[in-house]
Amino acid sequence: MPKSILAVNAGSSSVKITFYTLENPPRTIADASISGITAPPPTLKYQKGDKKHKEEVKEKLSTPQDTFKYLLQRCFSDPDLSEVASVDDLEYICHRVVHGGDYRDAVEINDETLDRLKGLEDLAPLHNFSALEIVRLCRVELPKVRSITFFDSAFHQTIPEAVRTYPINQEIAKANGLRKYGFHGISYSFILRSVAQFLNKPIEKTNLVVLHIGSGASICAIKDGKSVDTSMGLTPLAGLPGATRSGSIDPSLVFHYTNEAGKLSPASTSEMHISTAEDILNKQSGWKALTGTTDFSQIAVENPPSKAHKLAFDIFVDRIQGYIGSYYVKLNGELDGVVFAGGIGEKSALLRRTLVDKCQCLGLAIDDVANDKGPGDEETVKDISKGSSKGPRVLVCQTNEQFEMAYHCACSRS
Ligand SMILES: Nc1ncnc2c1ncn2[C@@H]1O[C@H](COP(=O)(O)OP(=O)(O)O)[C@@H](O)[C@H]1O
Ligand SMILES: CC(=O)OP(=O)(O)O
Ligand SMILES: [Mg+2]
């Protein structure tokens, strides 16, 4: 039986896994995910071809490792999934790791790289912990399968010095790795390749402003196929607000909010230390703090259920509009398109329409019918610009971080 690739995308509240054939390009065999780990009961979603299944998980899944093991076991024990019946059918496991520090490329896990990644965990405990717990588990329980880690930050290594440097003491900045890194890069890499192909342009001549907006949200300016700026910074907290994140705020706010800011948060564990301020701004802010829900589909509605929902929507629109304006100028107005991606970008026609209306002065215009319809299941990129528009294209891209990892894994092998 030919071997396969398993791609793992472990987030703070979900673990998604996808099995692919080991060929170039890889073909999806099956997809499984568990979401709602932090807001039980967790939900399992499973898809193989046209067969879709969703159920509440009864077992207690308190760690990313438990969740990953549960998903793997479910897939291995499915009689319809004969392609991946056991660990012997796997050649590679690709892991999405959010913070990769100075890494420019994916790395294969061995004692040395795992040690280096351990150092990064302190810089981004909230974001790297789940993924690295799963990497460690795979080392112990699936030692024959090669683990490759892909970093969200790697795509942004091209950001110029003046953009990535914080104006603080540079000795301290260098010693502690304090600079803008940027994230969602695995997704941006998928989007860039897919959109360049769609526009029939070479990647190195493609200029885009891309919005990856899901429960974590960021935006990226791409010039000649390279990231030149992005809204997230040292950690994914900077920039746009998200489901539970504040996004950029005046840093002094922290000390006015609570005088416990620097103390360890009760959410810390013996392996993961986070301060009270980090916990508040990362996990108790954003849509959740404003409206009580983390689900943007309840906020992005024509008639919002409360003033707070309307305010949350308006805040998001305001912050994104600011970045689009700034990046348009940084790209000298020479952009091929503005791309909407991520759960919200792909699904909310209302947010896309509102933003495009607010950015009319840049020549953006939308076709309402195409926008309302959105992309079909098999449509990776859809053009929703108004036919007569001479401005940059307005596009929706259904991003796929798992595929991007499997694709690079298969490419580097062939
Ligand atoms: N129709 C919709 N309108 C607005 N937001 C939506 C819609 N459908 C899903 N979303 C939002 O997309 C977000 C999840 O995005 P996704 O990129 O899948 O998540 P993650 O950041 O966890 O990877 C959630 O906040 C969800 O509410
Ligand atoms: C980097 C980041 O914010 O990731 P996610 O959107 O998956 O939370
Ligand atoms: Mg995501």
Image (cartoon, grey):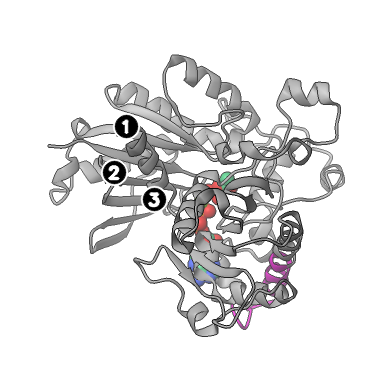
Percent position of residue 308, x then y: 71, 71
Find residue 241 and report its image quarter.
Answer: bottom right
Q: Are marks 1 and 2 in contact (CB under 8 Å)?
A: yes
Real-space CA distance between mark 1 and mark 2, rounded to the nearest whole angstrom? 9 Å
Considering only vertical position in the picture, is 107 above or below 345?
above
Residue type for callout 1: Arg
| Horizontal arrangement in the rendering, residue 61 relative to residue 296 (left or right) | left
Residue highlighted by disc 1:
413
Q: Earlier in the sequence, mark 3 or mark 2?
A: 2
What amino acid type is highlighted by mark number 2? Asn
Q: Residue at x 31, y 51 (%)?
A: 31
**Tag nearer the camera, 3 or 1:** 1
For the residue with label 1, is its CB less than 8 Å from the closest atom of ligand 3?
no
Q: Tell me the residue that label 3 is attached to.
A: 34
Q: Along the polypeptide, which appears first: circle 3 or circle 1?
A: 3
- Dominant secondary structure (helix, strand or loop) of the stretch shown in magenta: helix
Q: Residue 221, image x and y in percent?
A: 65, 53
- Residue picked out by circle 2: 24
Q: Is residue 39 visible?
A: no
Q: Percent x, y for residue 381?
A: 45, 65
Question: Residues in magenta?
Answer: 301-317
